[in-house]
Image: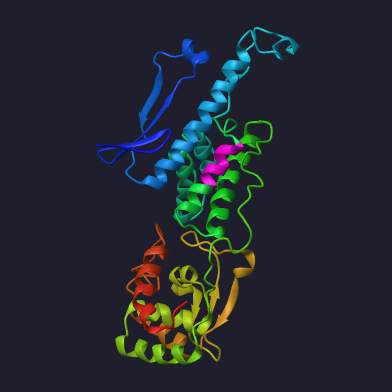
Amino acid sequence: MVEHLSPYLYSRNGIYYFCRRIPEDLKSYYKQEKITLSLRTRNPKSARIKSASLASQLEEDWLTLRWRSKDAPLRRFLRNQTSEARIESCAPLLSEAREIYLKVKGQDRPHTFSSAVERATNNLINLIGDKPIDTYSRSEANLLRDSFFERGLSRGSVDRMFSTIRAVINFTAKEIDLPAINSFSGIYLGEEGRSPVIKRLPIPLGNIRSIQKIFRTMDDEARWLISIISDTGMRLSEAIGLHKDDVQLEGRFPHITLKTHPWRRLKTRGSERTIPLVGVSLWATRRACEKSKNSFLFPRYCSEEKNKANSASAALNKWLRPKVPNH
């Protein structure tokens, strides 16, 4: 069964296709009278965005072909009338630019850094294609923006995606001495509040105290981890990467000396600090040190090869969420 959704988009057996006829004056450049190709998606929103992108690319190609025709009234002003209107790009493909960027900037970075770069660039490649970085147009950047909002991403998330793409393209352009590429700069993301943003609120002190009582009852590695965070204000990744050498439990003022390690970088230089241990954080740190069978306080989540902050966050939030108010 064929279902037509727009002038250039139709569905057959659930799969969406792009179809557009070649204008009469350009048919001599093509092998057939119309262009038809599968968009390889069953999602109507994704299909509309891909269809709009292909239509935009065709308009640009047709404009170039018409410009090259002898009848173009402005062609006589060109210095070399036999030259091509569009010069083949020597810039690397976006996938190649990503490799250059990660090879240099990704050294000693956590896995989340490369994942964020791959996620942002793959969004562009899957929607528009893997093109030389200096050939992406402003209209294609806008299509990417619209696709993000169609998927329900917040303004902040979209901004981060574009920041990552700009970083990859700008860094690579500088590395290989290309002119500045501005297709993804200054993209309009709408007014603040275009996408509803849920403000994260602090957990009320009463909830914290009631949850801390549960920690001592359950008395396991996951609860020790939350206990340390609850009374120190440490980031989850900071606590997960703790080494026994970071901990001083003897003396008048038990404390943690937080510093950078090969298995866990800190967010900023100012993140290096001395943190006093009090309340359940002191109890949890003692328990973690006593029970750990190696030099890490939380060997389940951290080793010299890997810091599993993401998986720990998912597991701990799943346990914690029903015990705290919404947002």
Magenta stretch?
138-145
Residue 284 visible at all = yes
When the figure is inspected, residue 58 is found, relative to residue 230, above or below; the finding is: above
Residue 85 percent coordinates (x, y): 63, 17
Residue at position x 60%, y 11% from top?
A: 69
Q: Nearer the viewer, residue 295 or 236?
A: 236
- Horizontal side of 168 relative to 220 (left or right) equals right
Q: Is residue 276 magenta?
A: no
When the figure is inspected, residue 321 is found, relative to residue 194, above or below; the finding is: below
Residue 244 percent coordinates (x, y): 44, 74
Quadrant containing the N terminus is top left
Residue 200 percent coordinates (x, y): 52, 74
- Horizontal side of 187 relative to 210 (left or right) equals right
Magenta segment main secondary structure: helix
Q: Nearer the viewer, residue 137 or 260?
A: 137
When the figure is inspected, residue 89 is found, relative to residue 75, above or below; the finding is: below
Residue 261 percent coordinates (x, y): 51, 63
Q: How many marks do you count on the picture?
A: 0
- Horizontal side of 179 relative to 218 (left or right) equals right
Residue at position x 63%, y 38% from top?
A: 183
Colouring scheme applied when the structure was drawn: rainbow
The quarter of the displayed image where residue 258 is located: bottom right
The quarter of the displayed image where residue 274 is located: bottom right
Q: Is residue 143 magenta?
A: yes
Residue 289 visible at all = no
- Horizontal side of 187 relative to 103 (left or right) equals right
